[in-house]
Image (cartoon, helix red, strand yellow):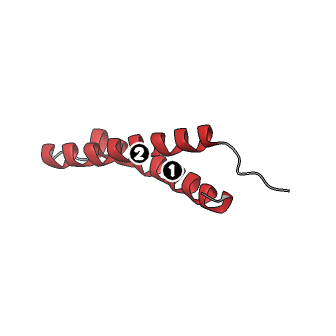
């Protein structure tokens, strides 16, 4: 994986974390429908777990070399 691809993966992972934070807030405090609460929470935690694994991959994969 090139350095540019790693950069984009880290941006996607950070974006997933922000989106999951918003979805958790919505599911806990703003949505009153129980089915929607569960759906939003499942989506949020799925995004959070996938961003965690992406960051673990990026941290332990190390640099790609360079100049």
Tell me what residue is drawn at x 51 percent, y 56 percent. Answer: 12
Dot 2 or dot 1, earlier in sequence: 1
Q: Mark 2 points at which residue?
A: 50
Q: Name the residue under label 1.
A: 13
Tell me what residue is drawn at x 58 percent, y 60 percent. Answer: 8
Identify the mark at residue 52; answer none if there is no mark. none
Q: In this view, does 67 lie above or below 27?
A: below
24 on left or right of 8: left
Q: Nearer the viewer, residue 55 or 65?
A: 65
Q: Where is residue 14 in the image (x, y as percent from the top left)?
A: 53, 49
Q: Position of residue 49 (x, y in %)?
A: 39, 40
Q: Position of residue 30 (x, y in %)?
A: 28, 46
Tell me what residue is drawn at x 48 percent, y 49 percent. Answer: 18
Question: Quadrant location of residue 46?
Answer: top left
- Check disc 1 and report its element: helix, strand or loop: helix
In the rendered image, which quarter contains the N terminus?
bottom right
In the rendered image, which quarter contains the C terminus?
bottom right
Q: Position of residue 23 (x, y in %)?
A: 35, 48
Query: How many C-alpha atoms fall within 10 Å of the one at disc 1: few (<14), some, or many (≥20)?
Result: many
- Check disc 2 and report its element: helix, strand or loop: helix
Tell me what residue is drawn at x 41 percent, y 45 percent. Answer: 50
The single residue placed furthest to the right in the displayed view is 67
Q: Nearer the viewer, residue 50 or 45?
A: 50
28 on left or right of 3: left
Q: Which of 12 and 58 is in front in this view?
A: 58
C-alpha span from label 2 to label 1: 8 Å
54 on left or right of 23: right
Q: Are marks 2 and 1 in contact (CB under 8 Å)?
A: yes
For the image, the number of numbered tags is 2
Query: How many C-alpha atoms fall within 10 Å of the one at disc 2: few (<14), some, or many (≥20)?
Result: some
């Amino acid at each position: 994986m090139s350095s540019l691809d790693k950069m984009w993966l880290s941006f996607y992972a950070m974006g997933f974390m922000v989106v999951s934070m918003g979805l958790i807030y919505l599911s806990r405090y703003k949505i009153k429908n129980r089915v929607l609460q569960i759906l939003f929470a499942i989506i949020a935690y799925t995004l959070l777990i996938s961003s965690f694994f992406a960051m673990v991959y990026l941290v332990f994969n190390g640099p790609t070399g360079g100049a």
